[in-house]
Amino acid sequence: QVQLVQSGAEVKKPGASVKVSCKASGYSFTSYVIHWVRQAPGQRLEWMGWINPGNGNTKHSEKFQGRVTIISDTSASTAYMELNSLRSEDTAVYYCARATTIFGVAPLDNWGQGTLVTVSS
Amino acid sequence: QSALTQPASVSGSPGQSITISCIGTSSDVGNYNYVSWYQQHPGKAPKLIIYDVSKRPSGVSSRFSGSKSGNTASLTISGLQAEDEADYYCSSYTSTSSWVFGGGSKLAVL
């Protein structure tokens, strides 16, 4: 079955960077887009960006332009999201989610368990 | 990209039907039939319940249905059950090839 397993919780200081991993299994990794979505405590879901592991193409939310990097390692069937210049407002649960196809318009039918990133001095 | 507008809370009694609205713009909901709805229980990851405005993934109850008119999408849950109590989020593809979520609606089954 499709599984997305994310790396563990992180605590970072303001100004630092965090890199969250998302290991996929149970399907062809290069055939489906992977998205990153975050959720601050008690807040709404917020879309961050996606990557097409088949060709490495990415698209980011304008809000995170310049601060977020999304990559994939096809040999490891793993996607990564790195967020730089962390501030307290970046404290959130970060989810990876697989789309239903390789196209950017496809919805998200499988989600990772989430990774809590806490930014605190 | 501003968040889509949803009511903060909705409520209904078991067996009743409720509808959650999701208001966007001509750059997202109004221009694309790529509207999805997600159900999220506390402490859990979201679950896809409606995609492409009105399609249901395999395994999702037929009590969930979706529709769209202009810039407004809607999720209807019929025959409310206690387990439907959760947060519901709409999302839409946008003209900038990105996605936007709604603010979320908390459903209380009274």
Image (tube, grey):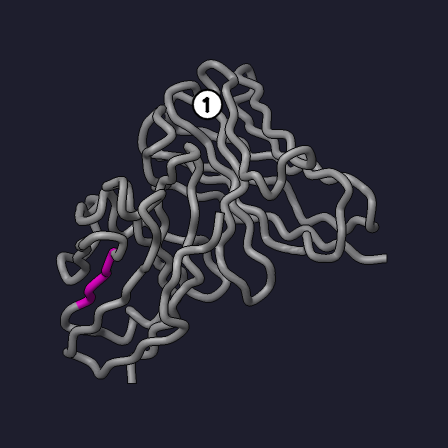
In-image side of B100 versus A92 (left or right): left
Circle count? 1
On the image, numbered disc 1 is attached to which residue? A52
**Quadrant where the C terminus of chain A is found in the figure:** bottom right
Residue A95's place in the image compared with A24, above or below, is below
In-image side of A19 versus B27 (left or right): right
Which residue: 57% across, 19% down?
A73
Residue A56's place in the image compared with A121, above or below, is above
Find numbered disc 1 in the image and state the secondary structure of the residue it sits on: loop
Please name the predominant secondary structure of the magenta segment in the image: strand
Chain under callout 1: A
Q: In the rendered structure, does residue A40 fall within the stretch colored magenta? A: no
Q: Quadrant of residue B72?
A: bottom left
In the image, farthest residue toward the right: A121
From which residue to which does the magenta span run?
A: B73-77
Which residue: 18% across, 46% down?
B55
Which residue: 59% across, 29% down?
A70
In-image side of A88 versus A54 (left or right): right
Residue B45 in the image, given as x and y percentages of width and height? 45, 53
Q: In the rendered structure, does residue B75 fall within the stretch colored magenta? A: yes
Residue A102 in the image, given as x and y percentages of width and height? 36, 24
Residue B75 in the image, given as x and y percentages of width and height? 23, 61
**Quadrant where the N terminus of chain A is found in the figure:** top left
| Of residues B29 and A29, the one drawn nearer to the viewer in this rendering | B29
Residue A114 in the image, given as x and y percentages of width and height? 55, 49
Kind of residue at disc 1: Asn
Q: Quadrant of residue A80?
A: top right
